Image (spheres, rainbow, N blue to C red):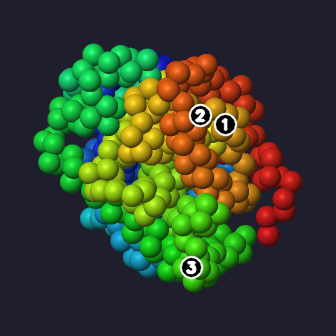
Amino acid sequence: MPDATLLDPRTDVRRAISVTELFTIGIGPSSSHTVGPMRAAHAFAEAALEALDPVGVRCELFGSLSLTGRGHATDSAVVLGLAGHLPDTIDPEAITGILQGVREDQQLLLGGRLSVPFRPDDIVFSHEFLPGHPNAVRFTAWDGEGREFTRTYFSIGGGVVLEEGGTLKIANAIVAHPFASGAELLEVGEETGLSIGEIVRRNECAWRSEAETDAFLDAVRAAMIASIDRGCATEGILPGGLNVRRRAKALHATLSARSDRAAPASVMEWISLWALAVNEENAAGGRVVTAPTNGAAGVIPAVLRYYEEFVEGATLEGSRTLLATAAGIGFLYKKRASISAAEMGCQGEVGVACSMAAAGLAAVLGGTNQQIENAAEIGMEHNLGLTCDPIGGLVQVPCIERNTMGAVKAVNAAHLALHGDGSHIVPLDAVIETMRQTGDHMRSEYKETSLGGLAVNVVAC
């Protein structure tokens, strides 16, 4: 039985987190149900090949990974990972062919180098919840003499994977300006005169040079913009059986034909379009940025595009500041609560993304650290209690539209905060703790299991 404390971010709030942990480029439709299991399967394949000479492999999905696994393409992700592929390097266009080959041949190339038999029933969906985390996957490989090699992994949110009994396999570092709460972050700013974005970027120097961090942020920005552009250029029906039609291309054509692009209502529609485009790409299994999850992948890109296209004087450096500031707020949610919908509901995904985006936008609009912290607090305060109840276990309804709501709300939160002086009744730390408590008290039916809410009140066709 795993030690549950290993899975509680609050037991290690002093650990420094890098922007490379928060923003990762991968594939849809889910960071915890697709990206995480693929990484776990890849890690297991490598370990199994080191431990023995496998002649077979089996996978068991537990809890939320089982209940919504088919809708989140968890089974496909497992096959891809076992075959040696990773979400940040696999070509999305090649996925269908790889999976079809495994189905037809009933063989997979374990770790990309050893052929073993593999059939659909070698992936078992168990509704049992393992201790420690709702997202669990167990792999077993065996050799010709019957010796077995077994490992269990937990997908703890944002694509991060923890092996049972282990610790996060992420390089720690001693940063220049450590902080583990919003209050500490503001204190660092007061003591150093640095903005939140500057604090984050100074801390990144513990892992790499400033130029390398800028290159990473630029790559994240480019991937976000590319996902918007692909979504705006693609039409058709999303996979999964709900027959959800992609709307971004038609909406883009409608908005592009208007002459009043900067009218307030049009601006709101453009923001909604950009979020819609990203999450349609995500639902189709396309390339998106986990920010901080795939289910909420459209919020920050939409707000970033709003800054670049509607804010006078927008610059590349400003886009870096927006992302770095957003990351600083995201760190707090990872440290003090969770960004996993299986633990927190959608408040931990779209709610966190809204809070991050609001902070980033407030920063590039000239906000003080206090106003930035206020924007982040507003963004989450009005997402508290948001459930995760995807119809058919698919990251489509209500997930796609929910990202448009989160993006618009983030812009509103930033502007509201800038109209104040930074003082406010509810501190960010209090709203993060409230989110955590709300997630703890939320029934499991509303935490990415598709056993409650819209998932049972709307018939999935």
Element assignment for label 2: helix
Foreground tag (3 vs 1) = 3
Q: Looking at the image, which is closer to me, 262 or 377?
A: 262
Determine the secondary structure under disc 1: loop
Q: Which mark is residue 259?
A: 3
Residue 405 screen position, x and y as percent: 64, 53
In the image, what residue occupies the spot 27% across and 65% down? Answer: 113
Dots 2 and 1: beta carbons under 8 Å? yes
Q: Look at the image and tell me in which quarter the C terminus lies.
A: bottom right
Q: Nearer the viewer, mark 2 or mark 3?
A: 3
Judge from the rendering whether residue 174 lies leftward or rightward of residue 418; answer left or right.
left
**Mark 1 sits on what residue?**
382
> In whole angstroms, how far apart are the C-alphas of marks 2 and 3?
33 Å
Residue appearing at x 52%, y 41% in the figure? 414
Q: Is residue 97 above or below residue 346?
A: below
Image position of 399 (left or right of 139): right
Alpha carbon distance from label 3 to label 1: 33 Å
Q: Residues within 10 Å of mark 1 (few under 14, many from 20)?
A: some
Looking at the rendered structure, the kind of residue marked 3 is: Ser
Q: Earlier in the sequence, mark 2 or mark 3?
A: 3
The amino acid sitting under disc 2 is Ile
> Which residue is nearer to you in this view: 180 or 103?
180
Left or right side of 16 for 329: right
On the image, the x and y values in percent for residue 31 come to 49, 51
- Amino acid type, label 1: His
Residue 422's x, y, as percent? 49, 26
Q: Is residue 356 above or below residue 301?
A: above
- The residue where tag 2 is placed is 378
